[in-house]
Amino acid sequence: MAYKLFIPGPVTVSEKTLRAMAQPMIGHRSTDFVALYQSLQPDLQALFGTKDPVYLSTSSAWGSMEGSVRNVTGRKVLNCMNGAFSDKWNDVALRCGRQGGALKFEWGQPVDPQAVRRELSSGQYDAVTLIHNETSCGCMSDIASLMAVIREFPDVVSIVDTVSSFSAMAIPKDELGIDIMITGSQKALALPPGLSLLSASKRALARAAGTPDRGFYFDLLEFQRNHENGMTPSTPVIPLIYALKSKLEDIRAEGVQARYARHARLNGAVRAWGESKGFRLFPAPGHGSVTLNCFSNSLGYDLPALNKILKSKHQLVIDGGYGKLKGKTFRISNMGDETDETIAALTRALDSALAEAPKACA
Ligand SMILES: *Cc1c(COP(=O)(O)O)cnc(C)c1O
C-alpha cells in the first residue's frame, strides 16, 4: 500500500524523481559520468552558497559526519549537543578515537553562542561540530550568531550538519565561514536515502592533509582529487545522482526564493493547525524548525493508534517522537515537495483522525 510520508525523513519522493532514477547505467569513469557530475556543480554550489566544490558521498549523512570529524580533528573537537543527532555526534567522535568535549543543552534548547565562545576560549579545541536544525526535537539554532562566534577562533575548523534544513532556507556557507557543510538526500531534497553531499573549505582540506588516520572512504583529499577529474573516489550511487539532477531542475524551475518561501509558509500552516488544537511546540520559542514541527503530546494522544488511523484511513504517516521523546512529542515534516494542497489535505486528515484517536492515559 502506498502512503505519504510526513515523517522528517525519508520524505515522499515524486514520480518524476523516481522515473529519473530508472535510467540506464553508465560507467563511473566514463566521459558520460564526468559530464553528469560536472553539470551538477553550479546548481549545488549556488545552493550551498559556496565557491568550493560539492562532493557526492555514497552514504547516508552519518558517513560524511563521521568522516569529517576524522579528517579535521587534530587536538580535540567540541561537540555542541542539543538533541539525538548532535548527542550521537559526540559519541561518534569518541568512537573514532578523537578527543571530544561535550557542550550539552537541554533537548529543544538552541545551541548558545556565548557558551560556545566560553568553551572555545579554553584553547583546547581545533574543531567544532554543530547541527543547524536538530530534527529529533525540531529545534533550529541561530547559525549566523554561532558562526560569528566560531569565526573568532581561526584555528577551529567548523563542521556543520545542515541535513534537515538544506535547500529549505538560505545557508550561505562561504559568507558564514562554515568549513564543512553536510547534507543528505532524503530530507528537504526529497530524494531516496543513500546520498550525502558535502562541501569543504581550503582550510578544512589543509587541516586534513596534516591529520593522520583519515581512512579512505571519507577522505576529503580523495574527494578533492577525484573531483578535479569530475569523479568520485569509488563507484557512486548513480541512480541517486540522476535523481539529484532531476531535483536540481525542479529547484531551478520553482526558483530558490520561492522554494524557501514555500517551506516557511507550509511550516507555519502546520504550526497554526497544531496550536489551534491546543498542542504546544516542543522547542524553545523562536527556535522552531522551518522544515518540521515537533509538538508536545500535551493532550495525551495514543500516538501509535493515531498513526494507525492516519495510515489505514488517510494513507499517510507522521512521526511519533524520536528516542527519549517517543510518545511525548510528535513530529510533522513539511520538507521537500509539499504544497498548500498536500498540507491542507494533511491537516484535514489529522482533524479527522484526532476525533477518533484514543488518549494514551485516559
Ligand atoms: C536525518 C539526520 C541525520 C542522519 O542522517 P542519516 O541519513 O540517517 O545518516 C543527521 N542529522 C540530522 C540533523 C538529520 O536530520
Image (cartoon, helix red, strand yellow):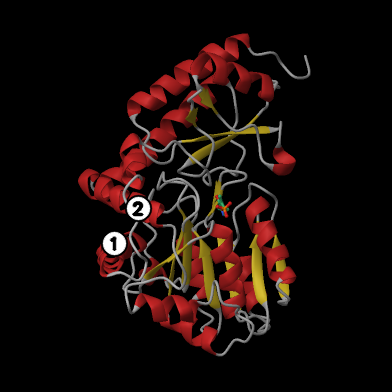
Q: Nearer the viewer, residue 101 or 228?
A: 228
Residue 105: which numbered mark, if any? none
* Pointers 1 and 2 in contact (C-beta within 8 Å): yes
For residue 299, say whether it is visible: no
Residue 254 versus residue 1 in the image, above or below: below
Q: Image check: 237 left or right of 245? A: right
Q: Quadrant of the C terminus?
A: top right
**332 shown above or below 30:** above
Residue type, mark 2 in image? Leu
Are there few (<14), some (14-19), or many (20+) residues within 10 Å of tag 2? many
Image coordinates of residue 165 in percent, x first then y, are 45, 51
Is residue 82 found left or right of 255 in the rendered image? right
CA gap, disc 1 and disc 2: 8 Å
The spot of residue 358 in percent (x, y) is: 69, 13
SS at circle 1: helix
Q: Residue, x 68% and y 79% (percent of image)?
A: 76
Residue at 62% from the left image edge and 19% from the top image edge:
308
Q: Is residue 25 above or below residue 91?
A: above
Q: In which image quadrant can residue 115 be found?
A: bottom right
Q: Which image quarter: residue 241?
A: bottom left
Q: Residue 91, position in %: x, y?
A: 73, 63
Residue ID for mark 1: 40
- Residue type highlighted by circle 1: Leu
> Which residue in the protein does label 2 denote?
244
Q: Is mark 2 within 8 Å of ligand 1?
A: no
Helix, strand, or loop for circle 2? helix
Q: Residues within 10 Å of mark 1 (few under 14, many from 20)?
A: some
Q: Is mark 1 within 8 Å of ligand 1?
A: no
Q: Is residue 312 left or right of residue 321?
A: left
